[in-house]
Image (cartoon, grey):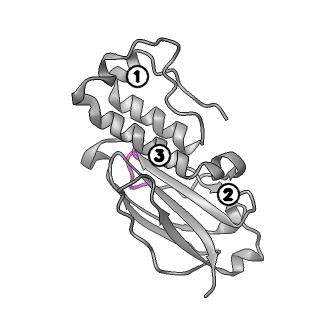
Amino acid sequence: MYAGHDMNGTYWQEPEEFAYLSAGQFVMGGQMGYAGMELTPKPNVTNPKDDHELVYLSKLSHAKRTVNPYFIHGRVQRELPDQPHVPPKTMMALPWLSKDKSSLLVPITSPLPGKTGSFDVDMLLDLTRYGIDTKDAQHYYSVNQIPAYEGQKVEQDTQKYLGTKVHIKKHIPGRDVVLLEIKQVRK
């Protein structure tokens, strides 16, 4: 799937817009950060004051490589429950069902920087609404965080949830990526 944006000129000049578009490309499983046909580096790409923008793009790229099997072979699912306490453009997330329909990936990212982009996610999922068979949803599931990039601190949820009542509660820092994989487990 190609969902790249042309990052020429103005996107590099607008860090918030650049981060928001990159986050959208990531959660949709698309090609990220198409820089156009121009071979001359943009001024902000090489400016040390904008290194934090490149760090975020690097996190998204590493996370995409980590979960590419979902993006390539899986299927995107309906939107997650609303998070009305989260300001607009703060959170991007879209669940992906695995090819064999045995697990669900929930990639969550916050394209806004620092404290303004930090937020808490709290949602209850009925996996039958996300492609998991009704019979399978009667079993228990775990919510495991997959490291999105090298050095990321991951916090695991040790609870087991009935497939019709999977609880996701997570703190998402600004300019970060959290990958949650929901898989069936034995009680």
Q: Amino acid at mark 1?
A: Tyr
Task: Judge whether residue 155 is colored magenta.
Answer: no
- According to the picture, the residue beneath numbered tag 1 turns out to be 11
Query: What predominant SS class does the magenta segment belong to?
Result: loop
| Rendering coords of residue 157 (x, y %) | 45, 74
Q: Amino acid at mark 2?
A: Leu
| Rendering coords of residue 10 (x, y %) | 39, 17
- According to the picture, the residue beneath numbered tag 2 turns out to be 97
Please say if 165 is above or below 30: below
Q: Is residue 96 left or right of residue 9?
A: right
Question: Relative to the observer, which residue lies in front, 79 or 2?
Answer: 2
| Rendering coords of residue 112 (x, y %) | 34, 41
- According to the picture, the residue beneath numbered tag 3 turns out to be 62
Q: Is residue 13 left or right of residue 73?
A: left
Give the label, 2 or 3, closer to the camera: 3
Which residue occupies 60% across, 54% down? 95
Quadrant for the C terminus, please.
bottom right
Q: CA distance from mark 2 to mark 3?
A: 20 Å
Question: Relative to the observer, which residue lies in front, 7 or 81?
Answer: 7
Q: Which stretch is magenta?
A: 84-91
| Tag 2–tag 1 contact (CB < 8 Å) | no
Secondary structure beneath disc 2? Answer: strand
Question: Relative to the observer, which residue lies in front, 73 or 40?
Answer: 40
Quadrant for the N terminus, please.
top right
The extreme bottom residue here reads 187
Secondary structure beneath disc 3? Answer: helix
Which residue occupies 23% across, 28% down? 48
Q: CA distance from mark 2 to mark 1?
A: 31 Å
Disc 3 residue crowd, few under 14, some 14–19, many 20+, Cα 10 Å: some
Q: Amino acid at mark 3?
A: His
